[in-house]
Image (spheres, grey):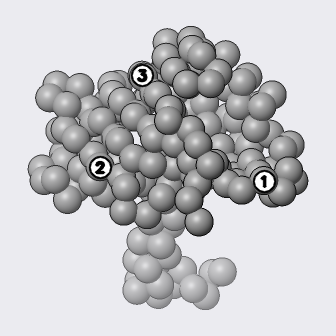
Amino acid sequence: MRILLKSPKIVLLFTLFMSIAVRMQGQSIPAFDDIKSQAELDKAGAVLDTALFDAYNRCDLQKFSSFLDDNVEFYHDRGGVTLGKEKLTESVKNNICGGDTRRELVPGTLKVYHMDNYGMLEIGVHRFYHPKSHTPPGEGQFVTLWQYKDGAWKITRAMSFDHHQASP
């Protein structure tokens, strides 16, 4: 390692690589006030949706709950309302983890809207696969309200509804 660090170019490349790696591990979505275009808003919404459901699909409850406001409200057409970060995380633990349920965003359905002085609203269609039950995938619509507060994006309200068997 001493040999590598003697070269200024190697030190610069190493520093650049490490800063990129650290940024990728953390929340690399821009701050609300730094988003200047619809394209940037769309990208931020897609990155947040992907990160949230990557944690959901892997049952990484700590990461999943990090996206939730303490007072999150989640409304589900079949499960009713779940209030609070702890209860929603517990619900995912009890109903999703261990069952191999996987959520995927249906390509081309995500729409992201700017919410002045607050954050963004996402609307889309998601599909749920249940490989252990050998049933066809289910599909439903969702609405997610993200607030940018205290340097982080958090979900304050979410709805999942219109659940039905997905079309082939």
Up-down relation of residue 95 to residue 35 (above or below): above
- Tell me, for residue 4, which label it has, or none: none
**Secondary element type, mark 1:** loop
Q: Nearer the viewer, mark 2 or mark 3?
A: 2
Up-down relation of residue 5 to residue 52 (above or below): below
Q: Residue at x 23, y 26 (%)?
A: 118
Mark 1: amino acid:
Thr
Query: How far separated are the C-alphas under marks 2 and 3?
Result: 18 Å
From the image, tell me which residue sits under label 1: 135
Mark 3: amino acid:
Thr
Mark 2: amino acid:
Lys
From the image, tell me which residue sits under label 3: 156
Considering the image in quadrants, where does the C terminus appear?
A: bottom right
Position of residue 104 in the picture relative to residue 117 (left or right): right
- Where residue 46 sits in the image (x, y, percent)? 39, 54
CB atoms of marks 2 and 3 within 8 Å: no
Q: Is residue 53 visible?
A: no
- Could you tell which of marks 3 and 1 lies nearer the N-terminus? 1
- Where residue 69 sits in the image (x, y, percent)? 48, 21
- Could you tell which of marks 1 and 2 lies nearer the N-terminus? 2
From the image, tell me which residue sits under label 2: 111
